[in-house]
Amino acid sequence: MASKSTFRTSIQPPPGPTAKLVFPSQGTPNTNPTIFNDAMIIRKHVFVDEQHCSADAEIDSDDLRSWHWVLYETSNESAAPVGVIRLVPPPQTPHAHLTEPPAAVEQAVPEYDWTHEPCIKLTRVAILPAFRGLGLGRRLVETALDWAAMHVAEINEAAVQIAVRGKSPVATPKPWQGLVLVHAQVDVERMYAGLGFVTDESLGRWDEEGIEHVGMFRRVILGK
């Protein structure tokens, strides 16, 4: 029973730009890191099977540069993945990539936003259905934010690595000052509000894979 379970989290560092991540499927060679594979078990179940998002779009370029946490149920001397979260370091994709027609974006909008204050982004937050209602989504968000507050140098270095690969108009990106973004599905907007996130009405509402989203921000105190 989930109520009698204990839980632990494990972190997968960024796989790196040369990693070959694949969507787990029958007959496909799989060289993913073990923790990332466990993350994909959750993501496939929740986003692809349950919410009917595209399997082809589930693994993206942010996976290569992000930190991933998997939450494991550890009852009965075994461990099974039940939840996941991803932390994407700066820079982020401009909001226009979500709200403007693709043709217009390709012509006028850069790949990354280097103009606004840098932020980290929490994405791919998911809990298996049998384990919902236990506060595990909140636990994953808090785990990622606590880690970020204590690993500022690593987050800033991740942004620098994007810049040195020719993705930035400036040699040295602005340092991260604790700003955090989530693109929340509207049915979990209240959960994020309870964690201190505030909906940015200027971003409006938009559709991702048939699901309405809002943009929410909060700030963490660095070093704590």
Image (cartoon, rainbow, N blue to C red):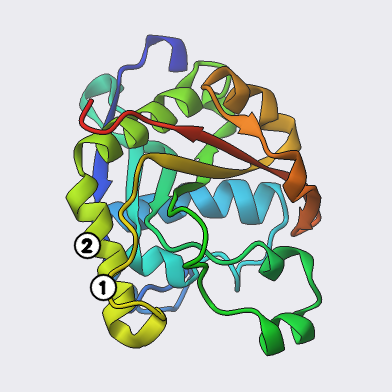
Is 197 situated above or below 92? above
Q: Secondary structure at mark 1?
A: helix
Q: Residue at the spot x=80%, y=48% of the render?
A: 205
The three-letter amino acid code for the residue at tag 1 is: Gln
Q: Secondary structure at mark 2?
A: helix
The image shows residue 125 at horizontal and vertical percentages of: 51, 42
Is 44 situated above or below 188? below
Asked if marks 1 and 2 touch (Cβ < 8 Å), the reply is yes
The image shows residue 207 at horizontal and vertical percentages of: 79, 55
Which quarter shows the C terminus? top left
Q: Dot 2: within a 10 Å radius of its alpha carbon, few (fewer than 14), some, or many (20 or more) residues?
A: some
Does residue 115 appear to the left or right of 48 in the view shown? left
Q: Residue at the spot x=68%, y=47% of the render?
A: 50
Q: Nearer the viewer, residue 1 or 122?
A: 122
**How many dots with numbers?**
2
The three-letter amino acid code for the residue at tag 2 is: Glu
Does residue 31 appear to the left or right of 215 in the view shown? left
| Gap between marks 1 and 2 measured at Cα | 6 Å
Q: Which residue appears farthest toward the bottom when viewing the image?
A: 107
Is 44 situated above or below 113? above
Does residue 129 appear to the left or right of 92 in the view shown? right
Q: Nearer the viewer, residue 42 or 148?
A: 148
Q: Nearer the viewer, residue 52 or 139?
A: 139
| Quadrant in the rendering for residue 160 | bottom left
What residue sits right under mark 1 in the picture? 161
Residue 157 numbered mark, or none: 2
Which quarter shows the N terminus? top left
The image shows residue 33 at horizontal and vertical percentages of: 25, 62
| Quadrant in the rendering for residue 16 | bottom left
The image shows residue 42 at horizontal and vertical percentages of: 48, 46
